[in-house]
Structure formats: structure tokens, C-alpha cells
Amino acid sequence: MSNDGVNTGRRRFLIATTAVGGGIGAVGVAVPFVKSWNPSEKAKAAGAPAKADIGKVEPGSMIVVEWRGKPVYVVRRTDEVIGLLEGLADELKDPNNTVTSQQPAYANNIFRSRKEDLVVIEGVCTHLGCAPKYFPEVKPQAFQENWKGGFYCPCHGSRFDLSGRVLKGSPAGKNLRIPPYSYVDENTLIIGVDEENA
């Protein structure tokens, strides 16, 4: 105790205790606040890559994989359909397959895929966002007499070939979108990861 009646030791103790208590309180408030900035587990899962087992997908068949809340069509094309794709240029709205910044570079071919026989396409019509139906058979359909296989959107009549290219006379103005994807191995596909641009 000093001469003027002030207990400096006690004052220092009270100041230190108050500072420590205030610091603990600030951390207690800051931790939940900072944690709230992190995405939820549901949000993480929604943006996460999706794996697809393609080992049992036979020629002419399709599986649907959900990625980012959208259906992704994985189709194994038949040799017959692969042979027809090149001859469809006159029937396409975009015969040059203009690649946008949203599409991977490997979609810039008539197959719009990494491999001729397997195509990976977002199953969302580029007109108004409906889900086109898969019509793989090369035969006349009610919506097109000379149908060569592909996707038909029953909502407004948009038609796409088996590369997801929009056909003339369709309300849709753009090809179906190709998501980023890569192969983990011969039988496993991962959607949402482009190994060449990762």
C-alpha cells in the first residue's frame, strides 16, 4: 500500500482480472460469429463432386446422377448413334458447337465429351429449365419423323441430339450444358472435377 491510501497491487489485480474476463467474453462471442461464416454441411454437400459408377451402363442406356441439385445424364451411346452424329450438322441450331466460358474445352467436338461412347450432360433444358426426356431409339417419333436419338423436352418441344446439341425449330437457343467431369478409373466418373483444369 502506498502513502496516499491506494492499494496499487489490488488495482493491478482487478485491472488484469477484468481484462482477462473481457478477452474471454470477446472470444466467446467471436467464435460462433466466425463459425456462422462457414457453409453448412448441407451446403458443402450440394456443391461437392458426385461420383457415378459407369461400369454397368450398357450401350443405349442412361443413368441419372444428382450434382448441385441438378440431374446429370450419363449416356452410353451405341455405335449406330455415334455414326449418325456427324451427319446432323444441317439440323443443328449451332453447327459449330460454340463453346461458352461455362463449358469445358473437351466439349468442343461433335461428341461433346471426353470419349465418343459416353456423354455427360446436365439434364436441364436451356429454354425454361425443364427436364428433357431420353429417347435413344433411332425411329420416327410423334415429335419428329426422322428422329435419330436424343432428348425431347415435353414442356415446350425443344429437341436435342445425343450430344446435347439443340436442333433447329426448338424453342431452346443453346445446347445442353456439359458439366466439368473426369474419370477416376475405367468404371468411375466424378462430376464437378475437371482433372485437367483443377
Image (cartoon, rainbow, N blue to C red):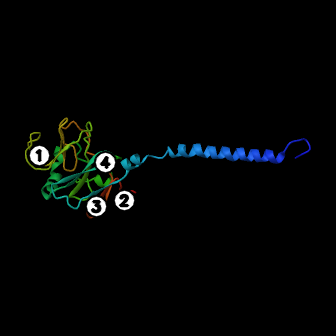
* Type of the residue with mark 4: Val
Q: Position of residue 135 (x, y in %)?
A: 14, 47
Say whether marks 2 and 3 touch (CB < 8 Å): no
Query: Label 3 is placed on what type of residue?
Result: Thr
Query: In this picture, is 152 found above or below 48?
Result: above
Q: CA distance from mark 4 to mark 2?
A: 17 Å
- Of the image marks 1 and 3, the number of the one nearer the N terminus: 1
Residue 99: give its label.
4
Residue under label 1: 147
Within 10 angstroms of label 1, few (less than 14), some, or many (20 or more) residues?
some
* Disc 3 target residue: 188
Lower sequence index among marks 2 and 1: 1
Horizontal side of residue 4 vs 160, given as left or right: right
Return the residue at label 2. Answer: 196
Q: Secondary structure at mark 2?
A: loop
Q: In percent of the image, x 63 and y 44: which residue is there? A: 25
Specify the amino acid type for callout 1. Answer: Trp
Are the residues at dot 1 and dot 3 in contact (C-beta closer than 8 Å)? no
Position of 70 relative to 79 (above/below): above
Q: CA distance from mark 1 to mark 3?
A: 31 Å
